């Protein structure tokens, strides 16, 4: 049981130190008559690892180095994407190159056009970018046709998918965005570490500057419930406001504030400031985290004909992901709460590790520098 808890904590601490999330690319396909106009945002760090963009070896990829490899980037990417309609191939050619900034760094933007013999209803897509060198990579697809958006996630296990241009059932869109909400809470490590830092003291109580195990599961459960509920309500508010365009904040500020919230929540377990009202902290900082979720949802896009349903589906997916974390963490933590291992290694050591990791994120995001790469 102790080993399981240690692995659970370490998973989030070491899986990805530098990035807000693991390797993703963003593929947008706009279907117009018998043509598909595409845009593919691919992280420069991933391309550098795959084909070596940093030609002078100084650790920084410049615009000049990217521009010199435009043809290589296009050839590499397009060889790993195959489009077809009604079972017939749609040859694609690159039409433009740009650079864009996402929350986790700079991305090469490849624009292309695919011409199909005929497009009636079904688009087939085979996606294989980076799967041979990074099995954790995901391709996030947004397919647009006559004002209707569909979405999909490509992985090594699901590299070939079909998409219908017919108006999808609203329930299907709800399920699709719910599934993506689950996935994005799992790759949003700063969100998870913030929640985990608040949950670590749930099975202990602070008295006379020492931590003591709670006697029963019930108080720990209610403490966790208050924290998760407060976090859920808060980020649901700002996620909705940001997605609907009511409030907009610079992503650099949001991501820096999210990292700062993780630092504060973790250090509170070392030098308690608000041990009795962690749910209040979860709510206040949850408002900021909601803007971070909104950034992810903006990358996916929302269907204009089912905006509210997709938004609710995504938000519920996030909650399902959170509940899964709590369902694993709470019973294991409760079982080992009386041990030295939990109080010193998991609670104290884990909180310090989370604080250090989040401080690295904070410095990187606030000052646009790279401290660690993996």
Image: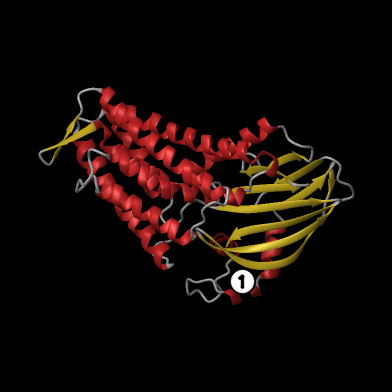
Q: Residue furthest front?
A: 246
Q: Is residue 28 left or right of residue 9?
A: right
Q: Of 294 and 12, which appears nearest the observer? A: 294
Locate the N terminus and report the quarter of the image it occupies: top left
Q: Residues within 10 Å of mark 1 (few under 14, many from 20)?
A: many
Q: Residue furthest right?
A: 117
Q: Is residue 1 visible?
A: no
Q: Residue furthest left?
A: 208
Identity of the residue drawn at 89% across and 47% down: 118
Q: Of 113 and 316, which appears nearest the observer? A: 316
Identity of the residue drawn at 19% across and 30% down: 213
**Residue 270 location in percent, x, y?**
21, 47
Q: Is residue 265 visible?
A: yes
Identity of the residue drawn at 72% across and 62% down: 111
Identity of the residue drawn at 65% across and 42% down: 152
**Residue 129 location in percent, x, y?**
64, 53
Colour scheme of the rendered structure: secondary structure
Q: Is residue 140 left or right of residue 18?
A: right
Q: Is residue 230 left or right of residue 139?
A: left
Locate the C terminus and report the quarter of the image it occupies: bottom left
Badge 1 element: helix
Q: Of 74 and 286, which appears nearest the observer? A: 286
Q: Which residue is mark 1?
A: 66
**Residue 109 location in percent, x, y?**
65, 63
- For residue 230, above or below residue 367: above
* Residue 217 location, quadrant: top left
**Residue 280 location in percent, x, y?**
31, 41
* Residue 369 location, quadrant: bottom left
Number of labels in the image equals: 1
């Amino acid at each position: 049981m102790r080993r399981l808890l240690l692995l659970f904590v370490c998973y989030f601490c070491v899986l990805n130190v530098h990035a807000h999330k693991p390797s993703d690319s963003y593929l947008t396909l706009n279907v117009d008559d018998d043509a598909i106009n595409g845009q593919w945002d691919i992280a420069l760090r991933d391309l550098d690892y795959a084909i070596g963009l940093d030609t002078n070896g100084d650790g920084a990829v410049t615009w000049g180095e990217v521009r010199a490899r435009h043809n290589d980037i296009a050839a590499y990417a397009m060889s790993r994407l195959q489009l077809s309609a009604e079972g017939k191939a749609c040859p694609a050619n690159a039409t433009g190159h740009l650079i864009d900034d996402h929350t986790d760094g700079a991305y090469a933007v490849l624009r292309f056009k695919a011409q199909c013999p005929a497009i009636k209803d079904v688009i087939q897509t085979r996606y294989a970018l980076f799967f041979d060198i990074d099995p954790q990579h995901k391709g996030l697809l947004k397919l647009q046709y006559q004002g209707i958006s569909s979405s999909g996630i490509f992985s090594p296990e699901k590299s070939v998918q079909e998409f219908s241009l017919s108006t999808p059932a609203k329930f299907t869109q709800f399920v699709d965005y719910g599934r993506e909400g689950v996935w994005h809470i799992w790759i949003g490590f700063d969100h998870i570490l913030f929640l985990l830092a608040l949950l670590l003291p749930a099975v202990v109580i602070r008295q006379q500057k020492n931590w003591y195990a709670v006697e029963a599961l019930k108080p720990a459960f209610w403490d966790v419930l208050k924290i998760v509920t407060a976090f859920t309500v808060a980020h649901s508010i700002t996620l909705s406001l940001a997605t609907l365009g009511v409030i907009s904040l610079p992503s650099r500020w949001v991501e820096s504030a999210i990292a700062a919230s993780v630092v504060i929540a973790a250090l509170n377990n070392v030098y308690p400031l608000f041990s009795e009202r962690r749910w209040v902290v979860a709510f206040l900082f949850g408002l900021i985290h909601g803007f971070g979720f909104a950034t992810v949802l903006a990358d996916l896009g929302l269907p204009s004909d089912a905006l509210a349903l997709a938004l609710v589906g995504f938000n519920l997916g996030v909650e399902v992901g959170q509940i899964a974390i709590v369902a694993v963490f709470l019973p294991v933590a409760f079982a080992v709460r009386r041990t030295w291992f939990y109080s010193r290694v998991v609670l104290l050591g884990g909180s310090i590790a989370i604080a250090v990791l989040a401080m690295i994120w904070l410095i990187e995001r606030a000052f646009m520098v790279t401290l660690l790469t993996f």
